Amino acid sequence: MAVLISLDIDGTVDVGDPPGPVTMEMARLAVARGHIIGSCSDRPLSTQRKIFAGHGIEVQFAVSKHMLDQVKARFVADTYVHIGDREDLDKRYALKAGFDFLWPEEATAMNWFTR
Ligand SMILES: [Mg+2]
């Protein structure tokens, strides 16, 4: 069961500003399990890739929030989920693109992120 996981950065991952509860270790674990991990933030796309690459994660995509629908069209997965900390940006765009949405705190309990 392949899950496509779209990660916001600021307020969501531990290397964001502010830091969030989803750790780079969790992201690496999900990659190792064969899930599709990508970045979806308001930061420049190349910056997004660099942030994850700096922690050993080659993201499969790096997009802005309004581009999530393109991600869904580009990848085949059983489940598409976006994780973010903002109702107006993350939740709104995720649901609009047909993604499931999780708050960062909720996401840390998902089995793709836990040992
Ligand atoms: Mg955020």
Image (cartoon, rainbow, N blue to C red):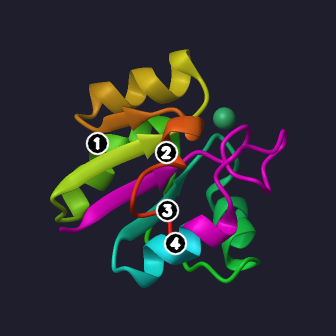
Q: Earlier in the sequence, mark 3 or mark 1?
A: 1
Q: Amino acid under label 4? A: Val
Q: In the image, is 79 to the left or to the right of 53?
A: left
Crowding at label 1, few (<14), some or many (≥20) Cα neighbours within 10 Å?
A: some
Q: Which mark is residue 59?
A: 4
Q: Categorize mark 4 by other alpha carbons within 10 Å: few (<14), some (14-19), many (20+).
A: many
Q: Quadrant of ligand 1?
A: top right
Q: Does the magenta stretch include residue 18?
A: yes
Give the spatial CA distance, label 3 vs label 1.
Answer: 24 Å
Give the mark toward the camera: 3 or 1. Answer: 3
What's the distance in space between the residues labelled 3 and 2, CA to CA?
8 Å
Measured in 3D between alpha carbons, the distance from the residue under mark 2 to the one under mark 1, in whole angstroms, is 21 Å
Cα separation, mark 2 vs mark 4, equals: 18 Å
Picture quadrant where residue 84 is located:
top right
Labelled pair 1, 4 in contact (Cβ < 8 Å): no
Sort mark 2 into few (<14), some (14-19) or many (20+) by Cα contacts within 10 Å: many
Upstream in sequence: badge 3 or badge 4 = 4
Q: Mark 3 highlights which residue?
A: 113
